[in-house]
Amino acid sequence: MQKPIFTAFTFTVCYLFGMFLNNDPLNYSPELNKEIYCMAKNIYHEAAYESFEGKSAVSQVVLNRLNDPRFPKTVCEVVYQNNGKTYQFSWTGMKNRKITDQYAWEESMYVAKKAMDGYTHIGLYRKNALFYHNNKINPNWKLKKVTQIGNHIFYSEFRT
């Protein structure tokens, strides 16, 4: 898929500017680098061709889960969580998932860094969106629809 030159140029400038400001993932601890990598892989495999907002929304669901006692306490554990039958994120159960689009991977890494640095998708944070799915499927969840961003529909639980 061909990307507009202006968009690729803008992203590259922002990415390099972030590196200049000492925000390059290589400057983080090894533990945080691992968490950023897990977040980026999830963003890439779930939302590689979504907008920046769509990628941020996927990362926000992972962050919201980190704040919920029912989910694990690290990004990697949240991303790879499975209950023995299903995975929380379907791509983690598939063999040989490779990164094939360098542009989408770099943007996913950028969004992951921003998320781990505290960038919040405020709408999904406030409404505590914990779940989403692609709009091409209907899992018949009994959850409260929060919003749709790109090809994903986001949900929170009903609060009593």
Image (spheres, rainbow, N blue to C red):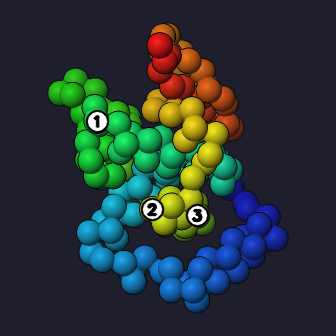
Q: Name the foreground residue: 138 vs 100.
A: 138
Q: Mark 1 points at which residue?
A: 69
Cα distance between the residues tagged 1 and 3: 30 Å
Badge 2 vs badge 1, beta-carbon distance below 8 Å: no
**Residue 91 appears in view:** no
Q: Which amino acid does label 1 sit on?
A: Pro
Q: Which amino acid does label 2 sit on?
A: Met
What residue is shown at x 51% (from left), y 86% (from top)? 22
What residue is shown at x 49% (from left), y 49% (from top)? 59
Cα distance between the residues tagged 3 and 2: 14 Å
Q: Give the label on residue 107, or none.
A: 3
The answer to whether 87 appears left or right of 36 in the picture is left
Q: Name the foreground residue: 98 vs 35.
A: 35
Q: Name the residue under label 2.
A: 116
The furthest residue to the left = 84
Q: Which of marks 3 and 2 is nearer the N terminus?
A: 3
Select label 3 or label 2 by which is in front: 2
Residue 17's spot in the image, x, y percent?
64, 83
